[in-house]
Amino acid sequence: MHGIRWLDLPRRTGNTVSACPSSRPQIRGKSPNVWLALDDSKPNVEYVVKRPPGDDDDTSSSNALSAFRHELEMQRLFAKDPMIRALVDYIPDSEPSGPMMVLEAFTDSLWDARNARPFTTKEIKWIVKGILLGIFTVHTKGLVYTVSKPSTREITSLTYRSPEVHFGKAWTQSTDVWSWGLILAQLLQAQVDFKSPGMYDSICTGTLAEKEKVIRDQLAIDFDLASIPLYAEDEQCTKILPAPQPEEAYMWANNMINKGVSAEDIQFLVGVLNPDPNTRLTVREILETVTYAAISVYEPTPHAPSSVLICYLRLWDI
């Protein structure tokens, strides 16, 4: 495999590759930097071609190129790991069309499948163990998996952002566990209440700052952050903590039980969604539980949407 001559680059589709973090809808007026490409010799095989986003501003352009190179470095670091999306080819900047990464394309996202039908319990556990193994792969390198924009350096989307991140604390590998727990919670919710949005998903409309405040305040109430020293004894945190509502704490768990989620699953979720990152369950501890230790992600479940599950056995994207 050499260069990109075998790719049908003129077939630009902009931001249509749902499983690629960079292909989310961008600001109007910006030129696309992600394409869906075809191998001329294999018309049914698709790839994602990605290059640094163009920008007239020198500082933004420099930051984008730096982020692109960092992403390339990470792709090469995990090149031999089956749990990470594959880097198929790289076009260096010494070539006219470079620099570009050619990545494995995902046909569906987990949320496409989630919105199609409820998963069975077996499917949910199989999916989330695959995601967890992807996170564990990153953690074994001493890294934290984040989705961040070079311009803001914000970690993950608002929905999956942990309390310590919302309140300005340093993030660690424990932050990834929180995000994973939110995915699990939303899949369990969809199983018993398919039409309702998941936890903190579409919680409000408005500006990004307004959404961030609403989710941060709701998290503080749902998990009673005012009673946790990590937040309650921090001067900066107390300035933005909402008024305590202890009677509302963990009502989300009660509501899930009332709708049919098992008490065992809720008890497990409470350990994963521990608002104190220092006492939150670790990836290794989760993998060693009876619930997940016996599940083989290399043996697909009979009724699972395989194309989606395979992609989520690799580096996850929500």
Image (cartoon, rainbow, N blue to C red):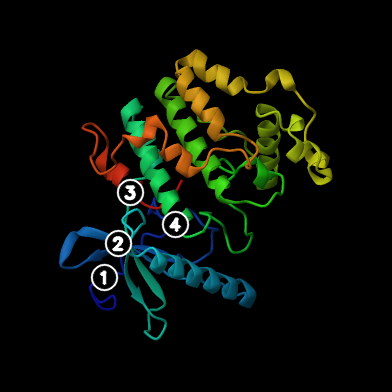
Q: CA distance from mark 3 to mark 4?
A: 16 Å
| Horizontal and vertical percent position of residue 270 | 56, 28
Q: CA distance from mark 2 to mark 1?
A: 9 Å
Q: CA distance from mark 2 to mark 4?
A: 13 Å
Mark 1 residue type = Leu
Is there any visible trace of residue 207 in the rendered image?
no
Mark 2 residue type = Tyr
Specify which label sits upstream in the sequence, 4 or 1.
Answer: 1
Q: CA distance from mark 1 to mark 3?
A: 22 Å
- Farthest residue, direction left: 41
| Horizontal and vertical percent position of residue 310 | 29, 46
Q: Which residue is mark 2?
A: 47
- Farthest residue, direction bottom: 94
Q: Count the numbered circles shown.
A: 4
Question: Which class describes the residues within 10 Å of circle 2: few (<14), some (14-19), or many (20+)?
Answer: many
Instruction: Check the picture and name the quadrant holding the N terminus.
Output: bottom left
Quadrant location of residue 63? Answer: bottom right
Q: Is residue 54 left or right of residue 223?
A: left
Mark 3 residue type = Cys
Dot 3: element? helix
Question: Which class describes the residues within 10 Å of circle 4: few (<14), some (14-19), or many (20+)?
Answer: many
Q: Which residue is mark 1?
A: 7
Q: Is residue 294 left or right of residue 318?
A: left
Mark 4 residue type = Ser
Q: Which residue is mark 4?
A: 23
